[in-house]
Each structure stands twice: as structure tokens, then as C-alpha cells.
Image (cartoon, helix red, strand yellow):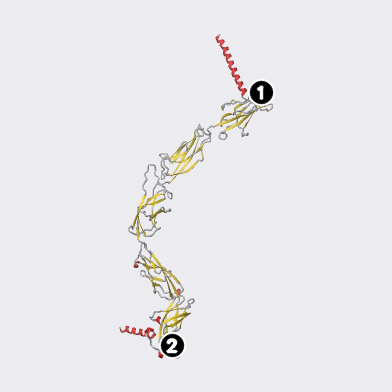
């Protein structure tokens, strides 16, 4: 009886509880104008209530997550309910905010069922904003405020990280040290940021050529590549490394890229001098001259900073007399005199020169710096050698045609302050026609061949060289200009003067036979070839081929010789002797020979001169 009595009690309690919850549900439905229900398999956020008055807006949106690309075909994703549907037939509508042409969603107007029709790519459209509306089917009256629903597309791992290119070509320096970073690889994953699907990690898959120990490393989180040990440029100059970028999605997705690495030559080898010592000579007082070239060998790549040499004078250049620079083509060091040297007690300078490269020598971690190669140079300062100098440096000669070969022209010698005179040698420097010869040790210039009429009017410039015995020997140059003129007959007519006619002037006339255009006015000069002649005679004005002659005192009757030098317009001259006869003239015009007197030798008459010559000749015979 007790059992039977308990059952009605439990039944009564159950009925009361059912009625209570039903009342609550009815109350909820009454206060919520819209309800999204039956979104199976999708994440629904809490529902929010709206007033039934169409004039009032909603207070909050609905948010729904849908997994991208999960839909295979048209699929029901939920239902929109409204309590106004209990009052009569209603029609539901929906549109996509901002893009009314999107057809990925639809709603069944009679019941509010919402469908998705094809997979959604979150990377293209991460969310949708839908607006739902409910109206009376009878009069199209809006029965409630519109409902806005935000649909978020839930990401799946459908994208692998991608590098900007499939293959990278980079150059790294050969002097990188262990642990030094040289390049950063970056891959981008277009899946949702901040999730495991877009988080990228990096791996070094392979390295070619393979070594005992990996040469490169990559930071898994940053993609930064680094060196694990010192590079050996001589052993391997190119590497090919495969890098993988993977995300952390489930399952993970990945891609790869190839990195081609070229190792740039560094300074692995120091330059070395090809010899250890040099000797050179420098004349005192000179500057700007190159003394010698220093040669080095370097095994690094030519024409790189690791190969180009840099020279330094370590000792012996305290006064700054020397400088050394690099020949950019041969890599040799050129030692040059920067400031003049003075010959004295310190006649030998010893230099120590070291060589290194423009690029500092590369030392791997823990390596020892080898010493720089060096060379010693002994510089002998010598007394400066000066070239011989001709005095005068220029000579001009005129000869008539027909001058014979072997005729001595001049003794043309040079002087040298630092060379003995008998150490100077002479030679013809320039004489293409072969007119002259010169003695090697005495400088006597002679005509080499007869200069006939074929050489008329030629003006030849001939160079004479004087060479000293210095080291190196120096040469001085003298110039001879030789002119060949036509031969000419210049003769003066004898002059007769009557005693008592006074001291002059008397007219002297010369007959000239010459080639045009060299005939013309003559210049007369009184020679002192015979002692005392200038004490008795004087020349006056000249005109054409004649000149005035004056006696400085009255002469007694007799024959007198007057030496003359007659020069033409080209400077060619002839020595002529004028025979002047002073006599008594009975008629004032012609000489009376019977009354001629013998004059004193000092007056130099012609008979006196002949007598002296005869006496000298007889004395020579008697002896």
C-alpha cells in the first residue's frame, strides 16, 4: 500500500516539474523574438533577446563559427525562429551585408531554415554579416526588428608556408666567423594568424657538397642562416642548401626552397717577395725617379682586394726620401725617390720594406697571424753625372763650292765638370748627307767629301755628340750649320796716284763675278795683315762695288800694297791686295817712271817687299 501510495506522489511531483519548466520555456519564447536553433556541428554563441516592437533595434549580434571547406554540398546549418509566428503565417528573408550577390547562404522563407551551399575559403572571406527579417505573409508587415548574425569562418590548415621564390642566389664573404649570420629566409603562411596553422618553423634539409660536419645552420623560429665553422675557400667555393618551411597545423604542411651560396674569396694567403734583397743606385740631387720594382707572389684571386699588394717602408726612411707605391696592373711595388739625396758620409741607405694586402688577412678562430713578408734594399748614393757642354753650343760656317774633302772646319770640343777632358768621346749625331767627320777623342771637325756645285745654296744642320764616361753615360749636343755658296771672282783694280794730288779720297773699284741672286753690294774692310798698313791708309764710304781710299799722310813715289777684306751680302769674303802706285806726273795725269823713288820698308812698297823675299831665299840656299 505504501508503494502504491508513493507512486501517485512521484507522478504528481513529476507533473508539477514538467509544468514548471514548460512555463519557463513559454516565458522565454515569449520574450525572445528570434531564436537560432538546431545549428548542429557548429559553434553557437549565447542567444540574445529583442523586444517585439519593430521600432526598437536589437541590442547585440549573434556570432556563429563555421569550419571552412567542411561543407561538401548544400547543408542546413540552423533555423531562425520568432514567437510572432504563433500569431499567423510569416515569411523569413535574409541578405548578406556589403555583398548582396553572395549566394553561399540562403534561407527558406516559410520556416526560417538557413543553408550553406558550398565550401568557404577563409583566406578569401574570413567572415560574413547576415541580416534576417520577418514579415507577415498576409500584408508584408514587418513583425520584428531585423536580426544581424556574424558568421566567422573557422580556419583549417589548408595552406603551406611559401617562400618568395623557389631558388635564392647569394654571395657570402669567405672571412665569416663561426656563428656569424649571413642571410634570413622568410616564408609566409596565409592561414589564420596567431594559430598553429600559420606558425612557421624552418629546417635545413641538405647541403651539397656534403662535409663531415654541417657548414651551415638555420634558426628554426627566425629563419636566420649562420656559419657553423670557418669557410675554406680553396676547398669549396659553391654550396647548394635545401631549406624547408613547415607550419604547426595538424597535419603540418610544408614547402622548400634552394639556396645557392657562392663564397667570395677572402685574404687567405699573404703576398711574398720573390727575392729577399735588392741593390740599387741613385744619383745625388735627383727626385721623382723610379729606383726599382719589387715583385711579389699571392695565391689569392687576382685583381681582388685579397690579392692587391700594399707596401710599407718599415725602416730606413726616417727623412722621408723614399716612397713606395703599387703598380695596379702588375701588383709590383715601385720604389721612388721622393726628396733629393745628398752625397756625403751616409752614401748608402738600407731600407726594409714589408708587404701586405688591401684586405686584412683572415684568421679563423684560434688561428695565429703569420709575419708579413719583407725585403731589404741597399741604396747607393752616387755623385751626380752632368752631361758635357759644347761652348758655344751653335756654330755657323759658309764655304764656297768645291771645298775639298779633308779640309779642317773647326776643333769643336765640349767641357764636363765631372769628367776628364780626355775621357770625352765625340761622334756625329745627325748628318744624313755625310758632309762632316769628327775625330773621336780630339773633336776636330773636317769636311768629309768635296762639296761641288750640286750642293749649292744648301743649308745643312749637323749635330755633334759629346759622350762622357759616367754611369750611365750622358751626352751633350752641339750644332754646326754649314752653308755652301757659289765660288766668285772678286778682284780690285790697281790704283795710280799722282804725287801732290792730296790725301784723297781715291776711288777703289772691285770686279765681281757671281750667280744671282747673290751678286750685289760689297763691304770693304782694311786688313792689318801687313804690319803698319793701318797707319798709312783709311777707307771711306762704299757704294756698290767701290769704296773711298784715303792716305793718312803724303807718300813719296813708289808702289804700295794695301791689304783688303771684301765681303758680299751673304757674308762670304775674299782677301785681296790693292796695288797703289804713287808717282810724279809731269803732265799731272801720267806717271814719269824715271823719277820713281825707292821708299822705306815701313811704307811697304811693292819693290821693298820683293827685295826682302829674294834676300831670305838666298840666305836659305846658302845655309
Q: CA distance from mark 1 to mark 2?
A: 185 Å
- Crowding near pointer 1: few (<14 within 10 Å), some, many (20+)? few
**138 up-or-down from 375: above or below:** above
Please indicate, yes or no, whether residue 339 appears anywhere in the rendered image.
yes
Quarter holding the C terminus?
Answer: bottom left
Quarter holding the N terminus?
Answer: top right
Nearer to me, 208 or 202: 202
Residue 35 falls in which quadrant of the image? top right
Q: Secondary structure at mark 2?
A: loop
Residue sitting at 40 percent across and 51 percent down? 310
Q: Is residue 129 left or right of residue 252?
A: right
Per the rendering, the mark at residue 348 is none
Can you give x and y, in whole percent of width and height, for residue 554 in the image?
Answer: 41, 85
Residue 61 falls in which quadrant of the image? top right
Q: Is residue 593 left or right of residue 108?
A: left
Quickly name the residue at label 2. Answer: 500
Amino acid at each position: 500500500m505504501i508503494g502504491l501510495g508513493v507512486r501517485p506522489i512521484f507522478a504528481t511531483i513529476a507533473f508539477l516539474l514538467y509544468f514548471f519548466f514548460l512555463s519557463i520555456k513559454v516565458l522565454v519564447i515569449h520574450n525572445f523574438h528570434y531564436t537560432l536553433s538546431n545549428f548542429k556541428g557548429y559553434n553557437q554563441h549565447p542567444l540574445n533577446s529583442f523586444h517585439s516592437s519593430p521600432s526598437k533595434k536589437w541590442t547585440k549580434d549573434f556570432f556563429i563559427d563555421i569550419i571552412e571547406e567542411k561543407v561538401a554540398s548544400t547543408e542546413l546549418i540552423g533555423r531562425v525562429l520568432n514567437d510572432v509566428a504563433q500569431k499567423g503565417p510569416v515569411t523569413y528573408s535574409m541578405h548578406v551585408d556589403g555583398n548582396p550577390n553572395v549566394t553561399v547562404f540562403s534561407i527558406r522563407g516559410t520556416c526560417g531554415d538557413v543553408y550553406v551551399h558550398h565550401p568557404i575559403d577563409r583566406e578569401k572571406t574570413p567572415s560574413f554579416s547576415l541580416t534576417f527579417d520577418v514579415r507577415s505573409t498576409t500584408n508584408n508587415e514587418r513583425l520584428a526588428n531585423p536580426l544581424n548574425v556574424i558568421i566567422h569562418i573557422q580556419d583549417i590548415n589548408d595552406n603551406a608556408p611559401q617562400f618568395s621564390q623557389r631558388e635564392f642566389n647569394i654571395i657570402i664573404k669567405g672571412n665569416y666567423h663561426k656563428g656569424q649570420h649571413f642571410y634570413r629566409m622568410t616564408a609566409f603562411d596565409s592561414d589564420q594568424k596567431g594559430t598553429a596553422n600559420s606558425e612557421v618553423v624552418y629546417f635545413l634539409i641538405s647541403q651539397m657538397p656534403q662535409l663531415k660536419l654541417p657548414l651551415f645552420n638555420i634558426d628554426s623560429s627566425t629563419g636566420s642562416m649562420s656559419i657553423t665553422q670557418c669557410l675554406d675557400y680553396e676547398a669549396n667555393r659553391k654550396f647548394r642548401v635545401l631549406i624547408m618551411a613547415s607550419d604547426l597545423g595538424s597535419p603540418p604542411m610544408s614547402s622548400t626552397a634552394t639556396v645557392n651560396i657562392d663564397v667570395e674569396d677572402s685574404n687567405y694567403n699573404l703576398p711574398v717577395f720573390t727575392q729577399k734583397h735588392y741593390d740599387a743606385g741613385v744619383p745625388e740631387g735627383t727626385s721623382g725617379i723610379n729606383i726599382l720594382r719589387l715583385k711579389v707572389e699571392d695565391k689569392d684571386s687576382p685583381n681582388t682586394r685579397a690579392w692587391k699588394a700594399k707596401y710599407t717602408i718599415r725602416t730606413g726612411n726616417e727623412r722621408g726620401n723614399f716612397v713606395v707605391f703599387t703598380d695596379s696592373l702588375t701588383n709590383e711595388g715601385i720604389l721612388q725617390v721622393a726628396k733629393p739625396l745628398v752625397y756625403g758620409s751616409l752614401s748608402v741607405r738600407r731600407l726594409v720594406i714589408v708587404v701586405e694586402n688591401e684586405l686584412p688577412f683572415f684568421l679563423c678562430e684560434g688561428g695565429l697571424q703569420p709575419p708579413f713578408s719583407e725585403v731589404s734594399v741597399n741604396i747607393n748614393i752616387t755623385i751626380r753625372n752632368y752631361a758635357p757642354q759644347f761652348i758655344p753650343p751653335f756654330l755657323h760656317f759658309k764655304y764656297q763650292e768645291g771645298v775639298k774633302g779633308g779640309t779642317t772646319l773647326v776643333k769643336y770640343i765640349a767641357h764636363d765638370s765631372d769628367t776628364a777632358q780626355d775621357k770625352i768621346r765625340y761622334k756625329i749625331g745627325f748628318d744624313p748627307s755625310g758632309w762632316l767627320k769628327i775625330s773621336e777623342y780630339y773633336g776636330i771637325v773636317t769636311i768629309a767629301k768635296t762639296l761641288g756645285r750640286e750642293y749649292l745654296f744648301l743649308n745643312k744642320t749637323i749635330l755633334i755628340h759629346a759622350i762622357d764616361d759616367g754611369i750611365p753615360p750622358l751626352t751633350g749636343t752641339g750644332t754646326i750649320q754649314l752653308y755652301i755658296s757659289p765660288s766668285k771672282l772678286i778682284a780690285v783694280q790697281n790704283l795710280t796716284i799722282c804725287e801732290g794730288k792730296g790725301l784723297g779720297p781715291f776711288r777703289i773699284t772691285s770686279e765681281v763675278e757671281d750667280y744671282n741672286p747673290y751678286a750685289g753690294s760689297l763691304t770693304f774692310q782694311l786688313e792689318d795683315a801687313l804690319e803698319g798698313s793701318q797707319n798709312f791708309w783709311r777707307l771711306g764710304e762704299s757704294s756698290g762695288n767701290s769704296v773711298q781710299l784715303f792716305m793718312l799722310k803724303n807718300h813719296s813715289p813708289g808702289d804700295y800694297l794695301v791689304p783688303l777684306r771684301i765681303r758680299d751680302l751673304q757674308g762670304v769674303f775674299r782677301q785681296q791686295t790693292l796695288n797703289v802706285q804713287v808717282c810724279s806726273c809731269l803732265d799731272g795725269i801720267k806717271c814719269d817712271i824715271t823719277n820713281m823713288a825707292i821708299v822705306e820698308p815701313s811704307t811697304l812698297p811693292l819693290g821693298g817687299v820683293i827685295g826682302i823675299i829674294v834676300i831670305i831665299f838666298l840666305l836659305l840656299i846658302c845655309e
